[in-house]
Image (cartoon, helix red, strand yellow):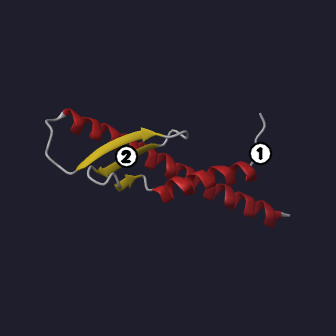
Amino acid sequence: MEIKNNKVSSTYSKAREAEAKAEAENMNAKLAVKQAEALKASPPVLTSQEVSYAIDNDDNVIIRIVDKKTGKVVKQLPPEEYLEMSDKLKRISGQIFHVEV
């Protein structure tokens, strides 16, 4: 029985660490949005790319650098892989831990 408790405790610790890392990266993304807003306020620079940002349903700040000519995303912060991983982690942690108050 103790082995199962230890495994649950270890899984919980890993989930909490991943959640803390995700929150830190989200804060970094919010800082990047502030920097992007400051850049938008500065005089325009002739370039073939533009910066856009949005907040998704999970309150993640998403910044995209888009090629003006093609409309393709050149870079996205945080990357799509991170957003997928974060979503999966939230779903898995909800299945592993059931908390009642």
Q: What residue is shown at x 36% (from left), y 48% (from top)?
A: 64
Secondary element under disc 1, as helix, strand or loop, is loop
Compared across the picture, whether 82 is left or right of 70 comes to right
From the viewer's perspective, is the residue at label 1 or at label 2 nearer? 2
Q: Which residue is mark 2?
A: 63
- Amino acid at pointer 1: His
Which residue of the protein is positioned furthest toward the right in this rendering? 1
Q: What residue is shown at x 37% (from left), y 46% (from top)?
A: 63
Identify which residue, 80 or 2, lies in the foreground: 80
- Amino acid at pointer 2: Ile
Tell me residue 15's x, y (percent): 62, 55
Quarter of the image that includes the N terminus: bottom right
Q: What residue is shown at x 74% (from left), y 53% (from top)?
A: 96
Compared across the picture, whether 81 is left or right of 65 comes to right
Q: What residue is shown at x 74% (from left), y 51% (from top)?
A: 95
Identify which residue, 41 or 19, lies in the foreground: 41
Label annotation for residue 98 = 1
Which residue of the protein is positioned furthest toward the bottom in this rendering? 3
